[in-house]
Amino acid sequence: MNKLRHLNNHSDIESNRQNRLFIMTTVAILLPFYIGAVVLIVHFLYLIWTNRKKLIQQIKEMGWIAVFILYTALVSLENRNYIGLAISLALFLVALYFSSYLESFSAKLYISLLKTISYGSFFVGIFNLVNYIIYIVKNNLSIFYILQTSNPQFRAEATFFNANYYGLFCIFSILISIYLLNYTREQRLRMFHALIISINLISIIMTASRMLLPTVVIAIFVLVFFIHKRIALVLLGTGLLGLIGVMLFPTLFPRFETLAYGFEDRFGLWNTGWNIFLTKPLTGRGPLSYINFYYLFINETDMHAHQLLIDSLANYGLFGIFILFNALFDYVNRLIEALKISEIRLEVGLVLAFIVAVLVHGLVDVSIFWLQTGFVFLIVCLCPTESMLKVRYEQLKKLEQD
């Protein structure tokens, strides 16, 4: 009996240690990527060491994901796309990391990570506002500078690599805060969640990214639809009226005056990405094919084709997309089945809102393929559907305590 109690205590200690490490890594991910990447690698090496006896089994359990990663590596090698080969290795390490995350998954850990992302976004937002104030004071500009110019020289990036990545993170944070708000009765905490949502909305405007506004409206609608359908329809109607107002009066928000030019620029990127795909439509040319092969068609470089589907086709080809669909098939099936369980509608709604946000924003950008945005997306969307009932139970228990 004493031995059994000792084993249980050891298991609890190890579980708590793992939870703390995942929380610490999530905090680090919200810092500049070169800091977050280092912490993530250290955490990954720790997980590899502690799970070394199960490493082969973890790789086997990846199934089609492992096949897809191997495929991208081989295609990259064949095309001498060495950046793509490095990305394939990074994808493999990320897959192993999140395999360990799923093994350590618990309702307590999931909720803690959601709070870490939501609360962390508040401090990232404050950091962004401080940077903005410093910029306008230094350059003797109006506090409304971001709204008064069609080509702002300051675009909110905070601790992220660029404005679009930060904007997508803000949308994720808003969705998480709405989710947490639904399980909060304590008035001060509700006000704090409302403040977090407000700061992230302000940050989205300050990114001067045109596509983020419709994306946040649609994503919020999807989540709130699972909470209260009538409120969701009102929010959608209000959002659509706001977007119509922006179209009629483009000076209300930054860079909408140059919307036509923005789409002209995107059409050029899409056309180049499509032409890269056509050079090898079956196999693609490996990750980040755009930056490696743009010179075949144009002189101006860019990171990617700024369109999720076109960029994926150029990178992986039709064979790669087929393998990826097979890798995601079981996940999509489980998500569809979870839609039928009314008790976890809010948890499923959060995941679906994240996916919709990525797909909508993916019409004009590929911001999900970045360390910070990708990490937050996977933390939320990999929540096992069979564990969602435990998450809901923990949230309702907390609600009763409040």
Image (cartoon, rainbow, N blue to C red):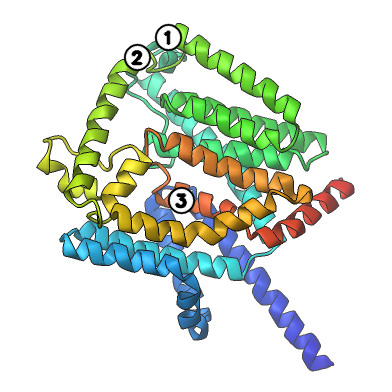
Residue 359 location, x and y as percent?
47, 39
The answer to whether 322 appears left or right of 101 in the picture is: left
Q: Can residue 113 be spotted in the picture? A: yes
Quadrant of the drawing holding the C terminus: top right
- Callout 2 amino acid: Ser
At 45% from the left edge and 82% from the top edge, which residue is drawn? 56
- Callout 3 amino acid: Gly
- Circle count: 3
- Callout 1 amino acid: Thr
Q: Residues within 10 Å of mark 1 (few under 14, many from 20)?
A: some
Looking at the rendered structure, the secondary structure element under dot 2 is: loop
- Which residue is outermost to the top? 249
* Mark 2 vs 3: CB contact within 8 A: no
Q: Which residue is mark 3?
A: 374
Can you tell which quarter of the image residue 82 is in? bottom left
Looking at the rendered structure, the secondary structure element under dot 1 is: helix
Can you tell which quarter of the image residue 42 is in? bottom left
Residue 162 location, x and y as percent?
37, 37
Looking at the rendered structure, the secondary structure element under dot 3 is: helix
Residue 208 location, x and y as percent?
41, 24
Question: Is 75 or 113 nearer to us in this picture?
Answer: 75
In whole angstroms, how far apart are the C-alphas of marks 1 and 3?
Answer: 32 Å
Q: Is residue 393 above or below residue 206?
A: below
Q: Which residue is mark 2?
A: 150
At 46% from the left edge and 69% from the top edge, which residue is drawn? 96
For marks 1 and 2 on the same chain, the one whose residue lies earlier in the sequence: 2
For marks 2 and 3 on the same chain, the one whose residue lies earlier in the sequence: 2
Question: Is 282 or 258 nearer to us in this picture?
Answer: 282
Residue 275 location, x and y as percent?
19, 41
At 70% from the left edge and 61% from the top edge, which residue is drawn? 387
